């Protein structure tokens, strides 16, 4: 079992302090030859980068020790904290409006009173296309129309689920175990979408199990309808969506491929309310080699490439912020706590 990390990082806010030297040459009552220092406010962007990268490197060392590969996924959307995460003050009977970062992070990690929704408005599509292709130098992988696929989740029993992908004819093209997140980092913004960074890994599905699902159709397409035809012995489809997907790629100076996946998702089968609406999703991702075979004996600068991805996601957030606010709102009220 690999240790996991959870981070809650708030933009324009920092719990860190900067240590700077003070010149006491002309200050009375203290030896001018003595080195003295003081504390000042830390730049929030530098603080977030430092805190994120330190935890990331710790998680990556755990991956290397366990010899597992993974991926870093960065998504834009909104972190919605439930009212149960906010204590009520005994004296006033009102919810607390100011909490320490450590306290609220601990509550979210232990009790999970929050919902993360990956979503951007449709108006952000041309903005994102211009941002990645013109401003950041990405290349559209397939210049034809977006690829149609189906994505779903199969519940085998109360504890085991599998995710799958099917092509536009309903044929299985991918079967996977769920992602296991080794590091979950949320960067919350006062306006516009938040950023979710997740270092993930998952074991491959055994060949005999893959053969069982390949032997028969999972879904059936008929005109404009999609039906679940999975045999009960193989489980139940609890989520299914129709996806139109485009991919953009860029190779960094160090030869690392950054992939941007744009998905226009139409849910067809859902269990939870937050899953039912159509949405546009963007995911920035890179491969993280943890095993010796994947690294091929070469050092991997996990800090450098992941910090680069963090900066890229911040620039992307700034590019789509106005369209997100115009379509979705989600602005902070003067009395934010319920």
Image (cartoon, rainbow, N blue to C red):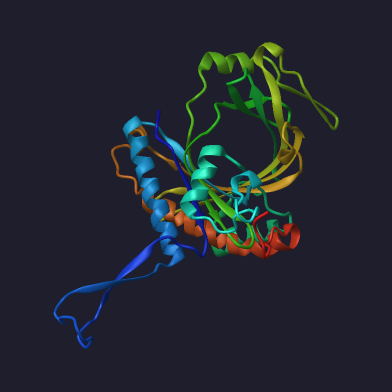
**Residue 229 position within the rendered picture, expressed as x and y whole percent measured from the top left:** 75, 18
Q: Residue furthest top?
A: 233
Kindly give the residue lying farthest to the right in the view shown: 223
Eyeballing the image, is 271 above or below 315?
above
Q: Quadrant of the C terminus?
A: bottom right
Q: Residue at x 16, y 82 (%)?
A: 32
Q: Say if 29 sits above or below 291 in the image.
A: below
Image location (x, y in percent) of residue 218:
70, 21
Residue 207 in view in this figure: yes
Position of 17 relative to 94 (above/below): below
The answer to whether one can see residue 185 in this image is no
User: Which quadrant, please, contains the N terminus?
Assistant: top left
The image quarter containing residue 172 is top right
Q: Residue furthest bottom?
A: 26
**Quick one: 105 or 230, which is closer to the camera?**
105
Q: Position of residue 207 (x, y in %)?
A: 52, 17
Left or right: residue 298 compared with residue 56: left
Q: Nearer the viewer, residue 20 or 140?
A: 20
Q: How many marks?
A: 0
Give residue 3's quadrant in the image.
Answer: top left
What residue is rendered at 60% in x and 41% in y? 113
Q: Is residue 128 above or below residue 219?
A: below
Q: Position of residue 177 (x, y in %)?
A: 54, 26
Given residues 204 and 46, the one toward you in this image is 46
């Amino acid at each position: 079992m690999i240790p996991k990390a959870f981070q809650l990082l708030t933009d324009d806010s920092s719990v860190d302090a900067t240590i700077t030297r003070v010149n006491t040459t002309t200050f009375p009552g203290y030896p001018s030859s003595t080195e003295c220092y003081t504390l000042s406010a830390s730049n929030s962007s530098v603080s977030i980068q430092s805190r994120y990268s330190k935890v990331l490197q710790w998680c990556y060392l755990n991956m290397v020790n366990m010899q597992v590969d993974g991926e870093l996924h960065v998504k834009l959307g909104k972190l919605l904290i439930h009212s149960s995460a906010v204590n009520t003050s005994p004296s006033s009977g009102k919810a607390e409006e100011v909490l320490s970062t450590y306290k609220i992070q601990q509550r979210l990690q232990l009790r999970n009173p929050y919902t993360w929704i990956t979503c951007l408005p449709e108006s952000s599509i041309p903005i994102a296309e211009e941002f990645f292709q013109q401003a950041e130098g990405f290349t559209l992988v397939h210049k034809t129309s977006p690829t149609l696929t189906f994505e779903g989740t199969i519940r085998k029993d109360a504890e085991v689920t599998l995710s799958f992908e099917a092509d536009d004819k309903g044929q299985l093209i991918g079967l996977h175990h769920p992602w296991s997140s080794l590091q979950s980092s949320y960067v919350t913004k006062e306006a516009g979408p938040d950023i979710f960074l997740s270092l993930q890994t998952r074991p491959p599905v055994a060949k005999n199990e893959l053969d069982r699902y390949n032997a028969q159709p999972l879904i059936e397409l008929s005109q404009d309808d999609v039906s679940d035809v999975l045999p009960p012995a193989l489980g139940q489809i609890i989520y299914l969506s129709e996806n139109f997907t485009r991919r953009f790629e860029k190779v960094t100076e160090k030869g690392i491929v950054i992939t941007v996946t744009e998905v226009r998702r139409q849910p067809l089968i859902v269990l939870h309310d937050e899953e039912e609406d159509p949405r546009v999703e963007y995911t920035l991702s890179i491969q993280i080699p943890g095993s010796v075979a994947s690294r091929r004996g070469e050092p991997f600068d996990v800090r450098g490439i992941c910090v680069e991805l963090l900066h890229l996601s911040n620039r992307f957030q700034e590019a789509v912020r106005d369209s997100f606010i115009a379509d979705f709102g989600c602005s902070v009220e003067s009395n934010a706590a319920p």
